């Protein structure tokens, strides 16, 4: 086969792959799962914490399956799973591994919320929590998001003194520069007005001196008195 033939086959394969990718891309982007912007959250031992999770689908959903799973370096298990029939029904729990877990989810106002509340926290609850969603309406397309929970004895206060000092210094410098620019413009304006007034004064004075003899640029000379 000639080089032109091989080149044509290669281009055709690349074109086919590209078209297939464009066809499948909306499918991969349609089902989204989010556990919020924070990748790590902290909670005090013995308290409660809400683990957020929401989902969205461009194609809608029916009998959507969801589950929360927990894993650390030693163990991995499913905490809770359930079904969301459609966008008009709330999530229904099927299996729950721990009585401390409460499903706080709702589909009202299209929030598609499948968050869980974990109560009476223990240090052993530290680990990764994954929210998993599968949508049969999208040919069982699935997606997941993970958040890390760190259970601590107490929450440490963040010292923002240095940050506040830096912000104050930066703000002061910016304010000083603005004042300098305004002062510069004011001085320029005053000097300009002063020069204009001085110029007007000189022109006016020159005009008065030349009116006596009618000669421009010269003063009138006094004539001595005529002798009798």
Image: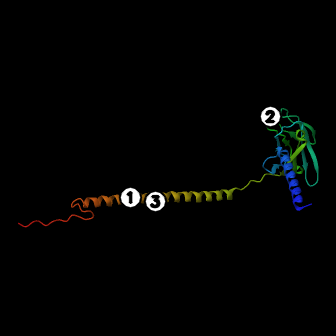
Helix, strand or loop status at disc 2: helix
Task: Tell me the mark number nearer the camera, choosing from 1 and 3.
Answer: 1
Q: Position of residue 80 (x, y in %)?
A: 91, 42
Residue occupying the point 59% across, 60% down: 173
Residue at the spot of label 2: 108
Q: Residue 95 is drawn in which quadrant? A: top right
Q: Position of residue 193 (x, y in %)?
A: 40, 57
**Most extreme residue toward the left, as rendered?**
228
Given residues 155 and 74, the one toward you in this image is 74
Label 2 close to label 3 by CB (< 8 Å): no
Q: Badge 3: few (under 14), some or many (20 or more) residues near its Cα, within 10 Å?
A: few
Task: Say whether residue 184 is left or right of residue 33.
Answer: left
Q: Which mark is residue 188?
A: 3
- CA distance for labels 1 and 3: 12 Å
Task: Say whether residue 105 is left or right of residue 226.
Answer: right
Q: Badge 1: few (under 14), some or many (20 or more) residues near its Cα, within 10 Å?
A: few
Residue occupying the point 34% across, 58% down: 200
Residue at the spot of label 1: 196
Of the numbered discs 2 and 1, the one sitting upstream in the chain is: 2
Task: Tell me the mark number nearer the camera, choosing from 2 and 1.
Answer: 1
Q: Position of residue 24 (x, y in %)?
A: 86, 47
Residue occupying the point 94% across, 51% down: 75
- CA distance for labels 2 and 3: 64 Å
Helix, strand or loop status at disc 3: helix
Q: Badge 2: few (under 14), some or many (20 or more) residues near its Cα, within 10 Å?
A: few
Of the numbered discs 2 and 3, the one sitting upstream in the chain is: 2
Q: Quadrant of the C terminus?
A: bottom left
Task: Tell me the mark number nearer the camera, choosing from 2 and 3.
Answer: 3
């Amino acid at each position: 086969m000639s080089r032109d033939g091989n080149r044509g086959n290669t281009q055709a394969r690349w074109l086919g792959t590209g078209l297939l990718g464009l066809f499948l891309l909306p499918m991969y982007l349609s089902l989204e799962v989010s556990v919020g912007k924070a990748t790590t959250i902290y909670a005090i031992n013995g308290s409660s914490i809400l683990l957020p999770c929401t989902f969205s689908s461009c194609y809608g959903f029916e009998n959507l399956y969801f589950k929360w799973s927990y894993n650390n370096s030693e163990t991995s298990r499913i905490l809770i799973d359930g079904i969301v029939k459609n966008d008009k029904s709330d999530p229904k729990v099927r299996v729950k591994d721990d009585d401390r877990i409460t499903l706080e989810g709702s589909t009202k106002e299209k929030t598609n919320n499948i968050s869980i509340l974990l109560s009476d926290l223990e240090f052993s609850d530290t680990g990764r929590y994954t929210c998993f969603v599968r949508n049969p309406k999208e040919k069982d397309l699935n997606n997941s998001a993970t958040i890390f929970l760190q259970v601590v004895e107490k929450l440490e206060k963040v010292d923002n003194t240095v940050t506040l000092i830096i912000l104050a210094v930066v703000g002061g410098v910016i304010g000083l520069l603005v004042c300098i620019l305004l002062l510069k413009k004011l001085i320029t304006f005053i000097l300009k007005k002063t020069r204009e007034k001085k110029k007007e004064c000189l022109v006016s004075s020159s005009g008065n001196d030349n009116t006596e003899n009618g000669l421009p640029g010269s003063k009138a000379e006094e004539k001595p008195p005529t002798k009798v």
